[in-house]
Amino acid sequence: MNIKLVESSRKFSEENIQELERFLSRLPYPHLQSLNHVERVVSLGGKLAVSSPEGCGEEITLSDGFYDLDPAEREYAFLHEMGHNYFDFIDENEGDRSFLKWGPCEKEDVAHLLRVQWIDLGLWGLDLENWEKVKALNPGSSANRDKYTYIVMYKNPNYRMGEWVCPLEARIPKNSFQYGFRYDQPFYSPKEEMGDAYALFVLERDHFLISAEASNVIKAKYKFIQKHFTDNSRGVIKLVR
């Protein structure tokens, strides 16, 4: 399987290419269908890496900051973005794009979306005080209705007010990677936890499984991710310019 390299303002070295191919080789072949190309840029405005918005671009973009990380952290960051791409890709291709709906929606309108299933599974809610602040910023917005409309509308970076809250008993314990499971950060949302859980399952499955033994909610999260890794097929991956 060929995945395209896009060198907008930086070149990929041969070492970079081999490393990315190694990262991707850990994933089942169906997951790779959610990635069309990888782009290399100088800066992402402080971000290390980003995946395609709303899952429609099937891309991952890497900055110079990404390559300042040590190899283990780079792999975690890359697989985190693959998690975003993979779950968005499924929602777009098996759903009806209602996660792009402009305006309020009922839960039943979006219950088929994996992200909506994840927020209910993890008992995620909205901090009411900060949510009121968000609505006050744009009181006429029909998106400011409830958590289902909110997650469907992809409110990032959530005005850095920390609207999303995950109960302590539902939180996956922090692993060895510095950028994983940052529940105390204002930007952290179900979307970010979903990407972290994906990367954790690939790289530190034992940690995930041990954590699951202590909490039925974490166990449900583990099983949710696990069922997407039942296909063990692998393909030959080649990154091409």
Image (cartoon, rainbow, N blue to C red):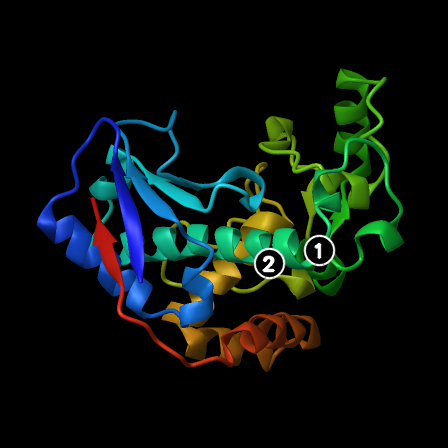
- Residue at image location 73% in from the left, 50% down from the top: 96
Q: Secondary structure at mark 1?
A: loop
Q: Residue most toward the left?
A: 14
The N terminus, quarter of image: bottom left
At label 2, the amino acid type is Ile
Q: Are marks 2 and 1 in contact (CB under 8 Å)?
A: yes
Say which residue appears at 44% left-offset and 50% top-offset: 81
Picture coordinates of residue 237, whole percent (x, y): 27, 64
Would residue 87 be found to the left or right of residue 39 on screen?
right
Q: Which residue is mark 2?
A: 90
Compared to residue 228, the image places residue 65 above or below, namely above
In this rendering, would 219 be left or right of 181?
A: right
Q: Label 1, on which residue?
A: 95
Viewer-proximal residue among 196 and 241 = 241
Q: Nearer the viewer, residue 235 or 120?
A: 235
How many numbered marks does the figure carry?
A: 2
The residue sitting at 69% across, 71% down in the picture is 217
- Please, what is the three-letter code of the amino acid marked with disc 1? Gly
Screen quadrant of the C terminus = top left
Residue 100, placed above or below residue 226: above
